[in-house]
Image (cartoon, rainbow, N blue to C red):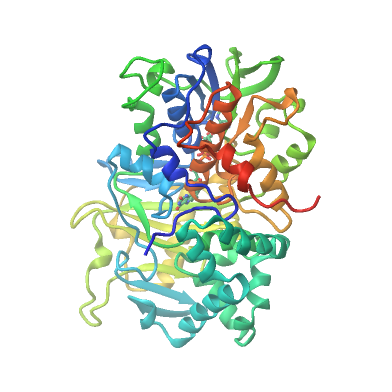
Amino acid sequence: MKPVTVFGPDFPFAYDDWIKHPSGLGKLPQAAHGRQVAIIGAGAAGVIAGYELMKLGLRPILFEAGQFGGRLRSQPFEGADGVIAELGGMRFPVSSTGFYHYVDLLGIESKPFPNPLTPAAGSTVIDLLGKTYYARTLKDLPPLFQEVAQAYDEALEQGANFTALKQAIRDRDIPRIKDIWNPLVAAWDERTFYDFVVSSEAFQKLSFHHREVFGQVGFGTGGWDSDFPNSMLEILRVNVTECDEHQRYMVGGVEQVPRQLWQRAPDKIAHWPRGTTLRGLNDGATRAVAKRIRRISENQIEVTDSWGRAEAFDVVLVTCQTHLLTTQIETEETLFSQDLWMALDRTRYMQSAKTFVMVDRPFWKDADPVTGRDTMSMTLTDRMTRGTYLFDNGPDKPSVMCLSYAWMTDALKVLPLPVEKRVELALSALGKIYPDVDIRSHILGDPITVSWEADQNFLGAFKGALPGHYRYNHRMFGHFMQEDMPPAERGIFIAGDGVSWTPAWVEGAVQTSLNAVAGIIAHFGGQAPPDNPSPIEAYLAHGPVRLSA
Ligand SMILES: Cc1cc2nc3c(=O)[nH]c(=O)nc-3n(C[C@H](O)[C@H](O)[C@H](O)COP(=O)(O)OP(=O)(O)OC[C@H]3O[C@@H](n4cnc5c(N)ncnc54)[C@H](O)[C@@H]3O)c2cc1C
């Protein structure tokens, strides 16, 4: 059977084939070689776009306000060797074939992520309404859990023609995808995930308690009630492209992806000598935070950094979260249409907090002498920790517990709290689930925590589109198509998680950064190779469906 990949459903384009194609992504006119492109943000979208633009002969100059890698942040525990906490993206579905292209290029090893009820987790504990269940697979749980899982499958089938849509994605059958997906866009853009669940025949037959359990346990990765207010389209995309399944983690940390790409000399490169790297073209380091963007002539846009250094660029690519164009960067208003400003500012970001500790060894695998069960397990709960994930670095090696991974209200509960208090609260919640386990006695070093909404370089974790936001997504995603734009709005591009159709998944950042690359090639008067048409041609042929104004 062909694999499911993030091929649409809004814009079915084979990004994975496009980037691998031997003819390359395009050719720029000689005069464009060596021209400077400003890239705001050294996260996945910024670094990948920079790498591809360098290969085409341009000089990408990256600006970074905080930490290199952005939301791919693998923070080392102090005093330990290679023990890390994944503060942003941590589990990467194999359907993210654009992202894995770079992972494979760099030779980074990955392993199955210890998600609930998977062999990689070993065992799972579900603790709901004061009751605790121990399981290795879904079959070990009481029938109610299976009823919930089955009801969601049925709801997807009845409400979204799910199997047929997934098959069309496997087959990369664009007309079929459009036939199924476009009516769903019109039907579900303005309705929530919760509405989809409760109005489905499958859940109507069941009790409120079933919906409650579904909200806590969800379909594979847990904690889906935080997404209940989102547009159902957001959720359907995750399900149908299998972003919630077959996930892997990057051994040694995902931050290696942007860091290694920054230092990698491509095998094939136009204009620049062999051995050229992004790091080299940037004189060894990124520029500081971008503070102002303004047009200085018909073809030039100026970016000023926090040191007051103002430089002129032919093109600017913005990859930071879109609301930062209002809060952090003095962005000349005429660079974007008012319709686009509406979308950039209305984009809704979700909150997320994680708290980690390092422990002496994966003690959770010790078998209880009486029950034979693991001492502790991957844990999903309605208590404030929500999800506890366990990362085994090998027997007797310092290992990592993500004590709590929470979203929205559960993330806000800890927002003003220092790390020590967060750990206390998490240990207290886990103490109720595992009264006989002394986690404290295993902890080494200092804990690590993050609240993405508290960081001025993000102000949120990732986009979570609300009902009625399809049109905003459409404007942002299609912004790389600049041919018909007024000259005052050309030459500035946007990419990244918030611009994509699959926010909270790095694949969306990758795909939108590749759209920007296609747009930038066109901006410089470049050509796509005839045997490797770009997203621009594909967008003209089968861009996302347009809803009425
Ligand atoms: C908690 C969390 C969990 C996640 N889990 C997963 C997961 O399991 N799987 C998955 O696939 N994806 C996951 N994601 C999503 C994934 O991490 C993102 O899609 C991806 O990293 C976004 O990359 P980006 O380049 O679009 O944005 P970013 O990584 O945010 O990069 C933008 C950069 O711009 C910088 N910046 C901001 N303002 C300025 C300025 N004025 N000047 C210069 N630079 C600026 C920021 O510091 C940042 O480094 C998760 C994200 C979070 C936050």
Looking at this view, name the residue that lies furthest to the left. 396
Q: Position of residue 91 (x, y in %)?
A: 40, 54
- The x and y percentages for residue 443 are 31, 54
Depicted 347 relative to depicted 169: above or below: above
Is 462 on the left or on the right of 190, as rendered?
left
Q: Position of residue 88 (x, y in %)?
A: 46, 47
Which residue occupies the foreground of this view, 99 or 305? 99
Locate residue 140 relative to residue 218 in the image: left or right.
left
At x 28% / y 71%, what residue is drawn? 375
Q: Is residue 418 visible?
A: yes
Residue 75: tell me if it is visible: no
Count the numbered circles shown.
Answer: 0
Q: Residue at x 70, y 18 (%)?
A: 295
Vertical position of residue 372 compared to residue 328: above or below = below
Please identify the residue farthest to the front as the structure is shown.
Answer: 530
Quarter of the image for the N terminus: give it. bottom left
Q: Position of residue 183 (x, y in %)?
A: 68, 63
Between 520 and 328, the residue placed more toward the observer is 520
Please report the residue visible at 64 percent of the width from the left and 50 percent of the height from the top.
544
Asked if 8 appears above or below 539 in the picture, the reply is: below
Residue at 47% across, 31% down: 529
- Quarter of the figure with residue 101: top left
Tell me: residue 135, above or below residue 505: below
Q: Nearer the viewer, residue 262 or 442?
A: 262
The image quadrant of residue 16 is top left
Viewer-nearest residue: 543 or 202: 543
